Image: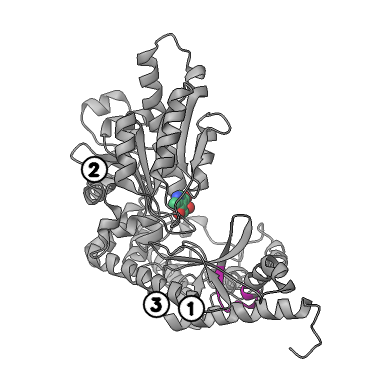
Amino acid sequence: MTSHGQTAPADAVPEDARAHLFNDRNLDRYRRAVTEGVERVARRVARADRPFTGVSPARLAERISGIDLDRPLHDPTAALDELDEVYLRDAVYFHHPRYLAHLNCPVVIPALLGEAILSAINSSLDTWDQSAGGTLIERRLIEWAAGRVGLGSDADGVFTSGGTQSNLQALLLAREEACAKAMAGSPSLPRHEILRRLRVIASADGHFSVTKSARLLGLEPGAVILVETDERRRMRPDALARELDRCRRDGLQVMAVVATAGTTDFGAIDPLPEIADLCGHADVWLHVDAAYGCGLLVSKTRRHLLNGIERADSVTIDFHKSFFQPVSSSAVLVRDAATLRHATYHADYLNPAYAAEQRIPNQVDKSLQTTRRFDALKLWLTLRIMGPDAIGELFDRVVDRAAQAWELINADPRFEVLAKSQLSTVVFRYLPPEGPARKLTDDANLHARQALAASGQAMVAGTKVDGRHYLKLTLLNPETSLDDIAHVIGLLAGHAERYVTERSPLHCGTA
Ligand SMILES: *Cc1c(COP(=O)(O)O)cnc(C)c1O
């Protein structure tokens, strides 16, 4: 007998497995389980006075490996108690205003509502017969996003799992367009010979997924040419022009230039109009990686920073970075919908040619994935409940705050701060006093970051610039105040100073 409305104690005989299925008979169980889950999350968030507990991997590994996955608890409450021990208590909380490490945003509630709905209905966005309206909703959002970019009336695109996949797909399309062009020019040239000569040009600060994609796409090791950046870490158009010339002289074919609209470390936006001019002259595909900077598309005050993006052949947008959406939510957009055909393959059981003739819309023809989440629903509800201006305001706030943080750290003699971000990062390092202690600079910064994370008081990121260790703040939380930042800077300085003092030859135990 199944027990509707009752939770079995842990030692009870397992009930009918069908009672766990999401369907009309088990809606009470569904409501109770999801509500209890939401309640647990709310309780944890209410109590989180730090972004992290600082728990060590070894401690958590012990707890997690101690669980016997072949002996179920048969009880959601017991399972949630256990989950609290192995996950919720020690998770890293991005909503916390002193989480300042990576490009993880606090999420907006309309998107969480979307997440709850999309996982229950579980539409799969590959074909109409697995999603119906979902297909059309995704298409409207792609149209909306391409409109914001300004890609013109032939634009299209598709949601992806993230910027990495968006970059990969954009470069796949660019590669196929380049191959077609090369083959048209010299029909006898074998494909492997064409592939051998393909090059991608990006700035030295571009995302590592560009290099990874080039390898996955069968390009030579070293096929990605990294050009210099200027004093604000933006791609130098003169350096790009030189590389384009050099490739032409060497008989190499540049299949794409990747401009970054918001580099991961420095929040730098490459000079898009100049780069677009050069790509136009050289007849080269322009991909703009706006995984981070896409939030400016809805900014009322800073949209102009993306000027030139409308001239791209393809664009990467990570809604799960600057649109305050839960992971995953990303899109690749293209100027010319026809180029998406390079991702189109037919399966008789799924997307047969006759379905296309009947004009039944499907998205699998445009995607690298087959079964695919209806992530678009989160953005849909966000736009329908909050609207784009509200998202733009949230992003503007973090960009404003980052500028203030830069000033604050720049005025602090204990620190050295690098190029001012156009978005919301700050790259800086603690500088020990002049003298022999300077040798400890790298180690002091590494230590400060680790000690801060271990305390759980705050989290910052680290990166390397010219071979030296730096600290990095990535601001994406509109609730982070300048006081929060001052507090974190103080903690970092304290950790670094103690480290240096303890190792300084003049240390006599009084510092
Ligand atoms: C984060 C990021 C990516 C990768 O996106 P994922 O969603 O993490 O796969 C690509 N490019 C830039 C500039 C990024 O900041």
Please check the rendered image and state whether residue 197 is part of the magenta-colored stretch, yes or no: no
Do we see residue 369 in this rendering?
A: no
In the rendered view, tell whether residue 378 sits above or below residue 309: below
Query: Which residue is situated farthest in the left direction here?
Result: 153
Q: Do the numbered discs 3 and 1 sit on residues whose CB atoms are within 8 Å? A: no
Q: Do the numbered discs 2 and 3 sit on residues whose CB atoms are within 8 Å? A: no
Q: Going from the N terminus, do you reach mark 2 or mark 3 first?
A: 2
For label 3, the residue is: 479
In-front residue for pair 476/276: 276
Per the model, the C-alpha gap separating discs 2 and 3 is 33 Å
For label 2, the residue is: 151
Q: Amino acid at mark 3?
A: Glu
The percent coordinates of residue 354 (x first, y second) are 26, 24
Per the model, the C-alpha gap separating discs 3 and 1 is 23 Å
**Mark number, residue 193:** none
Q: Amino acid at mark 1?
A: Ala
User: In terms of secondary structure, where does tag 1 sit?
Assistant: loop
Query: Which residue is situated farthest in the bottom direction here?
Result: 510
Region of the chain picked out in magenta, as a range: 452-460
| Residue at 53% over, 32% down | 223
Q: Amino acid at mark 2?
A: Leu
For label 1, the residue is: 411
Q: Residues within 10 Å of mark 3 (few under 14, many from 20)?
A: some
Per the model, the C-alpha gap separating discs 1 and 2 is 42 Å
User: In terms of secondary structure, where does tag 3 sit?
Assistant: loop
In the rendered view, tell whether residue 409 sits above or below residue 255: below
